[in-house]
Amino acid sequence: MILVFCELKDGKIRKASLEALSEARKLSGEAPVAALFVGASCAGSSDAAAFGADAIIKVEGPALGAYSSDLFAAVIADAVKAKGATALLGAATPLGKDVLPRVAAKLDAGYAAEVTSLALVGGKLQAIRPVYAGKAFATVDFTSGIQVASTRPNVFSATECPKAGAVETLPVPAVDFKAIVKEILAKGGGKQDLTEADVIVAGGRGLKEGANFKLLEDLADAIGGVVGASRAAVDAGWGIPHSMQVGQTGKVVSPTLYIACGISGAIQHVAGMSGSKVIVAINKDPEAPIFKLANYGIVGDLFEVLPELTKAAKALSLAK
Amino acid sequence: MKILVALKQVPDTETKIKVAAGGTSLDPADVKWITSPYDEYALEEGLRLKEAKGAEVTTVSVGEEKAKDVLRNSLALGADNAVLLKSTETGDPLAVAKILAAYAEGKGFDLVLFGNKGFGSDNGAVGAMVAELLGISQANLVTKLEVSESTFRAEREGDGGTEVVEGTLPAVITAQRGLNEPRYASLKGIMAAKKKTIEEVDGAAVTAAMAVSALTLPPARPEGRKLDGDAATQAQTLLGLLRDEAKVL
């Protein structure tokens, strides 16, 4: 059996979790797939049935309202053992990346991070994952009895495949946890994390100053995207936080659409976004290396092009 | 306070990746080796705690002879001791975590610091695994750290915001960019480090849970097209192509 650790956000299963669940369904064939939910409330988890969960396992209680890595790891590892699962998948979200390696160590299982392709070979997982910040791909064969992998968001498709979704509840283990999230500061205003965004509008040094990021935000709002930045923009002291940085030393993203504005295309940036499905480059320098990657290039002044794009997008009402 | 900082030797981040004969690993020819960039924040944090609270900082690396370069560098920056855990099992995060945990077990470290991931392998897993193997708390991707006698408070990059994690020591902390600004080694430090001894210990014998069976380069992206006309025309054309040809809007 493959167990999929799923996350809920605002009462809905996260898209990245549905992608992992769908992939588990595809890998499993006729073998069972179970979706695991952990939290103060697991309301919304029943949707997992539509995406291929034979079983929906809920571990809920007030003790799980705030995230504790050691407590959540214990809950997930217990569920793997209780169900006799041989593989555990979860999305490579901030929480998934925090807890899954810990679960793997608990289960003496190998762990592959941010995989972009999965197969079952001889009953064990085989994963392909980006290494060197996407400059190469490694095929990883597991030898451990249990295998754990986190799936990179936006790579696998979330496909409906209705199954029974029989609900089970497991108890919250009595773990004396050692660390917990006490509060969340500077909430991102409900904005999606870059790593999960479908559309990213990113700006670089060509934006000239932080205030001009407003142009990117306007376009992002018009087409349903999230704003990112190059290292040059983050390092320029324009007040752009590192959490917005795309690149080798920032976030590695794989959106459907990446619009690079005033970004030259340094290796360090390209490493973080070359996995994007469609890349658009807007740059006044026709020789900028970013054009080598771009499916569509606009050689021009972004201060003219961006407002035109926003205006045209609004006219088409493209925001989802 | 006793602090352990785990360092990984990695190819320089500007390295052009070439696959070695055999097709499973990086061709090491012409590769310049450096300390994994995130590990520099971990070491800096350890050194700052040492200066503020009088801690003893030990650096450790799992690897072969050449990994001594990063350890030597850590001594030049101010680490008190450096230990090479000799092993060739560096491809599987769980194996590395077991070697590190076996070394750290029982030595009374209050903090075990890591970079949030090793450049290249990009797993971001060893820190959390060591925390589990040692049965201690963890906070990953930390951008601000405060420690008291027996507890810590860490700000980390969480889901759409900054999370405050509080927990008890000992703890594993993995560093994110923004935690601090790493220092450069002074000439005096470099000279002094040359005289210090790097302890060499055989890493615990472990069995890898996974192995890389192929390393490949990503396919080249197809030739793109440049759009003509003035800004308004380019914008219209682009949106049309994104919607009707690429079908991404």
Image: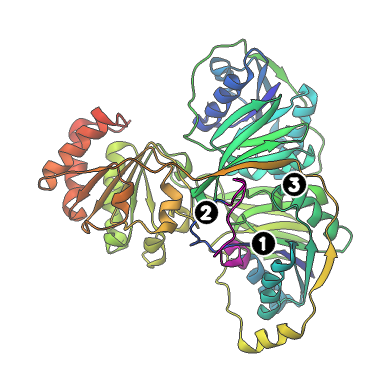
The span from disc 3 to disc 1 (Cα, nearest Å) is 15 Å
What is the spatial separation of the Cα atoms under label 2 and label 1, in whole angstroms?
20 Å
Numbered label tally: 3
Q: Amino acid at mark 3?
A: Leu
Question: Quick check: marks 3 and 1 in contact, CB under 8 Å?
Answer: no
- Span of residues in magenta: B20-40
Whichever of labels 3 and 1 marks the residue nearer the N terminus, that label is 1
> Mark 2 vs mark 1: same chain?
yes
Dot 2 or dot 1: first in sequence order is 1
Q: Is residue A133 magenta?
A: no
Chain to which mark 3 belongs: B
Q: Pointer 2 indicates a residue of which chain?
A: B
- Report the disc number at residue A38: none
User: Label 3 vs label 2: CA separation?
Assistant: 26 Å
Which image quarter holds the N terminus of chain A? Answer: top right
Visible residue check, residue A39:
no
Mark 1, residues whose alpha carbon is within 10 Å: few (<14), some, or many (≥20)? Answer: many
Which secondary structure, mark 2? loop
Q: Nearer the viewer, residue A298 or A286?
A: A286
Query: Quick check: B158 above or below B196?
Result: above
| Residue A181 image offset from top left, x and y in percent | 65, 48
Which residue lies under the disc numbered 3? B94
Q: Are marks 2 and 1 in contact (CB under 8 Å)?
A: no
Q: Amino acid at mark 1?
A: Lys
Residue positioned 67% across, 60% down in the render: B114
Same chain under badges 3 and 1? The reply is: yes
Which residue is identified by label 2? Answer: B18
The residue under the point 52% across, 61% down is B13
Pointer 3 or 2: first along the chain: 2
Which image quadrant for residue A53? top right
What's the mark number on residue B8? 1
Q: Secondary structure at mark 3?
A: helix
